[in-house]
Amino acid sequence: MNILGISCFYHDSAGALVVDGRLVTACSEERFSRKKHDSGFPVHAVNFCLKQAGIRIDQIDRVVFYDKPLTKFDRIVTGYMATPFRSYRPFLYALPSWLGKKLFTEHVIHKELGYEGNVMFLPHHLSHASGTFFSSPFDESAILTIDGVGEWANASYGIGRNNTIELLSEMHYPHSVGLLYSAFTYYLGFQVNSSEYKVMGLAPYGTPRFAKQIEEHVVTIHDDGSIHLNLDYFSFHHGLTMTSKNMERLFEKPRRVPDASIDSFHYYIASSIQYITEKIVLKMARHVREVTRMSRLCLSGGVALNCKANGLLLKAGIFDDIYVQPSSGDAGGAVGAALYAHYRLSGEHKRPQPFFGIGPVTNDQKIRSFLEHNRIPFIEADNRTNAESLAREIADGKIVGLFHGSAEFGPRALGFRSILADPRDSMMKEKINSAVKYREPFRPFAPAVLEECASDYFDCDRPSPYMLFNFTVHENKRNVIPAVTHIDHSSRIQTVNENDNPLFHLIISHFYKLTGVPVVLNTSFNLRGHPIVNSPKDAFATFASGGIDTILIGRYLLKKENISEEVLAQFRFKQKTD
């Protein structure tokens, strides 16, 4: 049975293909369109999934959409009708997209894909719940989903057992943890549904000085983790912005203009909303444990990408074990939709679904053809030789790019489409932020560590292969790896083993032999405003446009010092600032 899952029309569109119960491939549309957080119909991603699996569209047994468009439209219209005079302009702004595509999603699927079969529509949070539970290693667990909003729900909890999921309760719009965090993202001058992670990175520079004010005026937090927003401080429910002027009056500061300077006030605001979010998540988790009596938890939804909150939840010991879907946002809804349909239609026993090896891959023949066609000099070698070369480059202070194997699915680069550097260099963070990624100086970088050495450097006693939890760097190691130690001594770590990524494991192992440190700095292979690279051309253009010294594309090693300025200039692109 071939099941195709689709998510689109809001942000982070994606396609996912499940064949006989196995997640064989998944990809976000942005990787092909080169439009970050692309919300359009994922025709390129779907076509990739079909091609990768060798399946024609007429061999698809069921297409499953991660959302219920009619229910969502009902929520939007109901919200606009509650404030008709204030909502008139945003309603007119939104109406064309609904009348053009969103209300007719089934027709769009048939037309864009040439698909003639049945289309199933799942509730948004059931897609999130399915994506995390059905990909987890657990036979049974509690499930908690938290995001901005789906149809009406913005959080839910329930129980997963074998091949079934039962959602027990939901929290409804407009009282949303995700929208609360996004509203403060907007107030801080960052892009909503895109830059929430910047708030998370900024938070440790301050203290939660305004947390009491937020609780007294903006949000009421109940014992079970449910919340009630004071809508006087927001405008997302009736306008085209997230916050009202009351938010500026409360803090006696105007909303920060994007790309304006950041000062201590912004640190305090970021720290305060992060503190509030962590408090809510912990209360939700305790309530879910009490109601479900389950010892393990599966977590998903956009808020589940908040690594700091996840780390605190893990350390709180509310659950014995926690699994977070690596692509917990809307893109991962495509996976959840496909897996849910498979188990509902087949009745088969649940099995874990690894998220490695399911993304786009470019074979060496195509890579070599690209390099030779563009007269780009390269050195060809086997994996062991290339790993040794890259490890030496990193140890010598060079910044390297790594493009090999199947791309990661989700927002984290895990050593397949990564930029790597020496974590021992205290200036490396500043260097990569300013000269490679062209991004804000406060943004931290993550460490990739050999799985068997993780506990030597971090308060981590478990694998963390997907960069979804923050751990504390041991005090005696903070001066050893300063480039990946955030200001609060935390790190969003990735543990690396030989099975998940043999080449990456080999690179870190050689770096360990050279330096005595089993850790490298790992960040996504892209520049600010661009999606992670998806082709040899993307990789070379990023290499040509930033301060990367060396890249490995497949089997081919490229050093900038060996490439003419004329060739580099042909591929260099203009810097984006979003």
Image: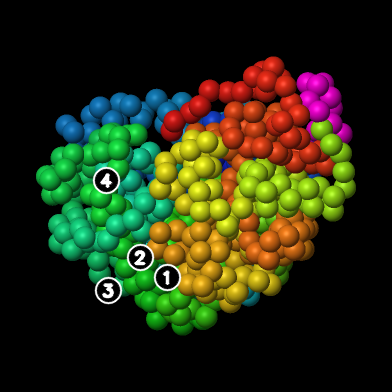
Is residue 187 covered in magenta? Answer: no
Residue 143 spot, x, y in % from top left: 49, 68
Left or right side of 131 for 202: left
Region rendered in magenta: 362-377
Q: Circle 1 sits in a helix, a strand or a loop, which is it?
A: helix
Q: Mark 1 points at which residue?
A: 312
Q: How crowded is mark 2: few (under 14 residues within 10 Å), some or many (20 or more)?
A: some
Sort mark 3 into few (<14), some (14-19) or many (20+) by Cα contacts within 10 Å: few
- For label 2, the residue is 278
Residue bearing mark 3: 223
**Residue 363 position within the rendered picture, expressed as x and y whole percent measured from the top left:** 82, 38
**Disc 3, SS:** loop
Front one among 479 and 500:
479
SS at circle 4: loop
Contact (Cβ within 8 Å) of mark 1 with mark 2: yes
Q: Which of marks 1 and 2 is nearer the N terminus?
A: 2
Instruction: Kindly report the distance in space between the C-alpha atoms of the residues bearing marks 1 and 4.
Output: 26 Å
- Residue situated in front as seen by the camera: 145 or 108: 145
Marks 2 and 3, how far apart in space? 14 Å
Q: What residue type is labelled 3?
A: Asp
Q: Earlier in the sequence, mark 2 or mark 3?
A: 3
Q: How many angstroms separate mark 1 from mark 2 (CA)?
A: 8 Å
Residue at the disc numbered 4: 263
Callout 3–callout 1 Cβ contact below 8 Å: no
Q: Can residue 550 be seen in this view?
A: yes
